[in-house]
Amino acid sequence: MVERMCHVCRTMRPKSALIRVVRTPDGAFCVDAVGKIDGRGCYVCREGDCVAKGVKSRYLNRAFKCVVEQEVYQEVVRYAGEQ
Protein backbone atom coordinates (compact mmCIF):
# COMPACT_ATOMS: atom_id res chain seq x y z
CA MET A 1 0.00 0.00 0.00
CA VAL A 2 1.38 3.37 -1.04
CA GLU A 3 1.19 6.10 1.59
CA ARG A 4 1.64 9.84 1.30
CA MET A 5 1.65 12.67 3.84
CA CYS A 6 -1.16 15.20 4.13
CA HIS A 7 0.42 18.62 3.76
CA VAL A 8 -1.97 20.13 6.32
CA CYS A 9 -2.11 17.67 9.25
CA ARG A 10 1.19 15.88 8.46
CA THR A 11 -0.25 12.37 8.91
CA MET A 12 0.62 9.46 6.65
CA ARG A 13 -2.42 8.01 4.86
CA PRO A 14 -3.06 5.70 1.93
CA LYS A 15 -2.77 7.55 -1.35
CA SER A 16 -6.43 6.73 -2.10
CA ALA A 17 -7.55 8.65 1.03
CA LEU A 18 -5.94 11.90 -0.15
CA ILE A 19 -6.62 14.57 -2.77
CA ARG A 20 -3.67 15.38 -5.01
CA VAL A 21 -3.19 18.89 -6.38
CA VAL A 22 -0.65 19.19 -9.19
CA ARG A 23 1.35 22.00 -10.72
CA THR A 24 1.95 20.83 -14.28
CA PRO A 25 5.21 21.56 -16.12
CA ASP A 26 3.50 24.47 -17.91
CA GLY A 27 2.60 26.07 -14.54
CA ALA A 28 -1.12 25.28 -14.42
CA PHE A 29 -2.74 23.88 -11.25
CA CYS A 30 -5.38 21.15 -11.17
CA VAL A 31 -6.87 18.47 -8.94
CA ASP A 32 -5.51 15.09 -10.02
CA ALA A 33 -8.37 12.60 -9.69
CA VAL A 34 -6.32 9.70 -11.09
CA GLY A 35 -3.03 10.43 -9.32
CA LYS A 36 -0.91 10.16 -12.46
CA ILE A 37 -0.72 13.66 -13.97
CA ASP A 38 2.86 14.77 -14.59
CA GLY A 39 4.11 17.55 -12.36
CA ARG A 40 4.77 18.46 -8.75
CA GLY A 41 2.07 17.19 -6.41
CA CYS A 42 0.74 18.07 -2.98
CA TYR A 43 -1.68 15.95 -0.93
CA VAL A 44 -4.48 16.82 1.50
CA CYS A 45 -6.88 14.55 3.42
CA ARG A 46 -10.34 14.05 1.95
CA GLU A 47 -11.93 13.68 5.39
CA GLY A 48 -11.98 15.88 8.42
CA ASP A 49 -11.16 19.53 8.59
CA CYS A 50 -7.95 19.33 6.58
CA VAL A 51 -9.42 20.88 3.43
CA ALA A 52 -10.98 23.77 5.38
CA LYS A 53 -7.82 24.32 7.46
CA GLY A 54 -5.69 24.10 4.33
CA VAL A 55 -7.71 26.69 2.46
CA LYS A 56 -7.61 29.03 5.45
CA SER A 57 -3.84 28.66 5.85
CA ARG A 58 -3.21 28.79 2.06
CA TYR A 59 -1.29 25.50 2.19
CA LEU A 60 -0.79 25.36 -1.58
CA ASN A 61 1.18 28.61 -1.49
CA ARG A 62 3.64 27.00 0.93
CA ALA A 63 3.72 23.65 -0.85
CA PHE A 64 4.44 25.10 -4.28
CA LYS A 65 6.37 28.18 -3.08
CA CYS A 66 4.29 30.53 -5.20
CA VAL A 67 0.95 32.34 -5.10
CA VAL A 68 -1.89 29.98 -6.04
CA GLU A 69 -5.13 31.46 -7.38
CA GLN A 70 -8.29 31.27 -5.26
CA GLU A 71 -10.00 29.26 -8.03
CA VAL A 72 -7.64 26.35 -7.36
CA TYR A 73 -8.61 26.32 -3.67
CA GLN A 74 -12.29 26.39 -4.69
CA GLU A 75 -11.70 23.43 -7.02
CA VAL A 76 -10.17 21.44 -4.13
CA VAL A 77 -13.16 22.24 -1.89
CA ARG A 78 -15.61 21.20 -4.65
CA TYR A 79 -13.70 17.97 -5.27
CA ALA A 80 -13.62 17.13 -1.56
CA GLY A 81 -17.39 17.72 -1.35
CA GLU A 82 -18.02 15.29 -4.22
CA GLN A 83 -16.19 12.44 -2.55
Image: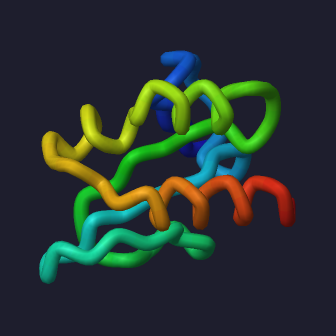
- In the image, 53: left or right of 69? right
Q: Where is residue 23 in the image (x, y as percent from the top left)?
A: 27, 65
Q: Which residue lies furthest to the top in this view?
A: 10
- In the image, 78: left or right of 82? left
Residue at figure coordinates x 50%, y 24% from the top left:
8
Pick the front one: 57 or 40: 57
Q: Quadrant of the C terminus?
A: bottom right
Q: Residue furthest front?
A: 70
Q: Position of residue 52 (x, y in %)?
A: 67, 33
Q: Residue furthest bottom?
A: 26
Residue at figure coordinates x 40%, y 34% from the top left:
59
Q: How are the residues colored?
A: rainbow
- In the image, 24: left or right of 29? left
Vertical position of residue 83 compared to residue 32: above or below? above
- Total number of numbered discs in the rendering: 0
Residue at figure coordinates x 52%, y 68% from the top left:
31
Residue at figure coordinates x 21%, y 49% from the top left:
67
Pick the front one: 7 or 3: 7
Q: Quadrant of the N terminus?
A: top right
Q: Position of residue 40 (x, y in %)?
A: 25, 58
